[in-house]
Image (cartoon, rainbow, N blue to C red):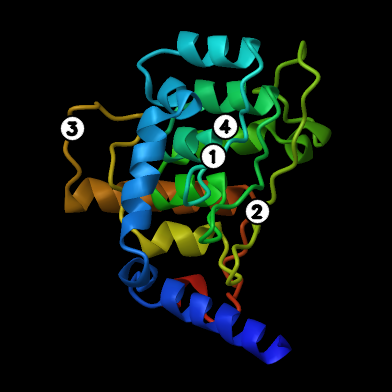
Amino acid sequence: MGYILRGVVLLWAVLCIFGGGFYLLFPKLKVWDNDFIQRNEAFQAVFSGNEVSLKEFIVKGGDVNTRSVLGLTPLHAACATGQIGKAMMLLRAGAQIDRRNWFGASPLSMAAMRGQYKLIEALFKGSTEYSSNGDNSNSDSNSNYSYYLSPNQRGWYGEGALHWALSSSPSSPSPSSSASQPITNSNSNSIRLATLKALVKAGADPLLRNYIGKFMKET
């Protein structure tokens, strides 16, 4: 039985690592996930144009750690889209910053993959690691929440945030740019560079290997 379980886990890993083969076996999962997100109140509050609906959702006791079909949480969505205010609001309400989706991506991983360097900077300024070092310029002294965020947090396959930042191109504008500005090769590269700098400044290890021995530059 143990060998069968190991085989299933190995197959899962191979499918996830090589070219999205997971969706070849379960093509409807992404459709179901999108359908869930469109109907779920927490995700709709994150994607809405202001913070009022999210605040209302939290005040009435909504689950800020709800998961989509593929394991995404509202905090994943806020980080991927660079919404600093909503991300901090979710964290104050108890959202788990280290919760991964079924592919091993944390909210930090999603922010790195989408080039949301302003949000990454805000997340690290608000973490207990930075607060304990005296850098609490972005913390809320009236709140009783705290979280710890490691810049070398690993995914299921040992990949750090730097691996995620290099493995995908930014697919939406950075919060510092105009929302109508299209992503081009030149500003995509500048966003990626700013993301890498933000992660290294926070202490991310450029020499971190994933579990198959690859450095970030080899991903």
- The residue indicated by pointer 1 is 73
* Numbered tag placed on residue 120 in the rendering: none
Write down the quadrant of residue 2 in the picture.
bottom right
User: Where does the N terminus fall, quadrant-wise?
Assistant: bottom right
Q: Dot 1: few (<14), some (14–19), or many (≥20) neighbours within 10 Å?
A: many
Residue 35 x/y as whole percent = 34, 39
Residue 201 higher or lower than 129, as above or below: below
Whole-number angstrom distance, CA of label 4 to CA of label 3: 23 Å
- Nearer-the-camera pick, 7 or 207: 7
Residue 212 x/y as whole percent = 56, 83
Looking at marks 4 and 3 on the same chain, the residue that comes earlier in the sequence is marked by 4
Residue drawn at point x = 18 percent, y = 27 percent: 180
Q: Nearer the viewer, mark 1 or mark 2?
A: 1
Write down the quadrant of residue 134 in the picture.
top right
Whole-number angstrom distance, CA of label 4 to CA of label 2: 14 Å
Looking at marks 1 and 4 on the same chain, the residue that comes earlier in the sequence is marked by 1
Q: Which element is circle 3 on?
A: loop
Q: Which element is circle 1 on?
A: loop
- Nearer-the-camera pick, 202 or 108: 108
Q: Nearer the viewer, mark 1 or mark 4?
A: 1
Whole-number angstrom distance, CA of label 1 to CA of label 4: 19 Å
- The residue indicated by pointer 4 is 122
Give the residue type that dot 2 points to: Gly
Residue drawn at point x = 59 percent, y = 63 percent: 155
Residue drawn at point x = 62 percent, y = 64 percent: 205
Looking at marks 2 and 3 on the same chain, the residue that comes earlier in the sequence is marked by 3
